[in-house]
Image (tube, rainbow, N blue to C red):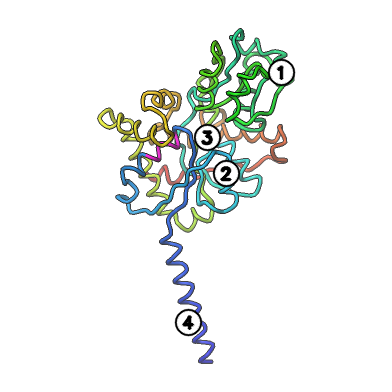
Amino acid sequence: MRTTLKFFVALMMSSFMIAKAFAGAPLKIGYSDWPGWVAWEIAIEKGMFEEAGVAVEFEWFDYVASMDAFAAGQLDAVAMTNGDALVTGATGAQNVMILVNDYSNGNDMIVAKPGISSVAELKGKKIGVEVGFVGHLLLLNALEKAGMSETDVELVNVPTNETPQVLASGDVDAVVAWQPSSGQALKLVPGSTKIYSSADEPGLIYDVLAVAPSSLATRKAEWQKVLEVWYKAVAYLKDPATQEDAIKIMAARVGLEAEEYKGFIDGTKILTLEEALPFMEKAEGFKSLYGSSVISDKFNVDNKVYESSLDVDSYIDPSLMKAL
């Protein structure tokens, strides 16, 4: 009996120590090269997380690698698009979108070679795009608006970061990419033209912070602080008095000059809390994270990215944003 009691006490103490160690571990967040996520760098550099009393560890990745790391359980959260949050969940790494950082407002674009000046002129042409990813959805939206469909063009599957070189090679007539790859394509191919962009369909692409459900359930108070810090960083970026410093911080993270990087920020609608909250309300269409995600879900199923439609509502938790 004494041995059993001693074992029980030891077990309880061990569990307590494990829980205490877990609670003190930093939240691990993966992020990558997109202005709405690079803005986290402001909070990191300015010590905003320390001021808020929350321990975080940001890890820099190439975009697809960040989702792979999250799927492998190496991260508590990852920055990705709402459509890719669904893909990640469907393939085995459930997640919950708790924050809308921004929506793409021109940085995602279709860049055509010289001589092509409209989407309609893509009929019968080859288009380099990463099939099944957000650029593919942008392309379908553009084709639909021009009275065409995917069958009217020939898709060439190209990783997004390779699209500038593929356009320059002449193997395709146009590419679909986001910054910085879209900007690089325009520079690399003299006379190339942006013929469609995410500014033509605001809300097609939302950029979010997606968290593992287990981490959100056990550390919700810490995630609440993370969101508070995010909006401090956004305020620092939006304030004319500190905006120049904020852009320098972001540009340094990706190795660009501040003046060049400012153009990338202009193509991204980084949202204040007041701007973001309406998108967290349930509604159809692109003016809601819910509606946009339903459209992305259909795209994913139609393109056999995964087999069956998902319960989109279970992937979105607006409570932390609303609590602010």
Q: Which mark is residue 67?
A: 2
Q: Decide which of tag 3 and tag 2 comes sooner along the chain.
A: 2
Q: Tell me the distance, in whole angstroms, between the alpha carbons under discs 1 and 3.
A: 29 Å
Q: Which residue corresponds to mark 3? A: 289
Q: Which residue is mark 1?
A: 153
User: How far separated are the C-alphas under marks 3 and 4?
Assistant: 48 Å
> Between tags 3 and 2, which lies in front?
2
For the record, the magenta segment spans 36-41
Instruction: Decide whether the magenta segment is chiefly helix, strand or loop.
Output: helix
Give the residue displayed 40% in from the left and 44% down from the top: 227
- The nearer-to-camera label among 2 and 4 is 2
Residue visible at 42% across and 33% down? 255
Report x, y in % for residue 265: 41, 27
> Callout 1: 10 Å neighbours few (<14), some, many (20+)?
some
Secondary structure of the residue carrying numbered label 4:
helix
Q: Going by the picture, which residue comes out furthest to the front?
A: 169
Amino acid at pointer 2: Met
Q: CA distance from mark 1 to mark 4?
A: 69 Å
Q: Which residue position is annotated with label 4?
A: 9
Q: Is residue 38 magenta?
A: yes
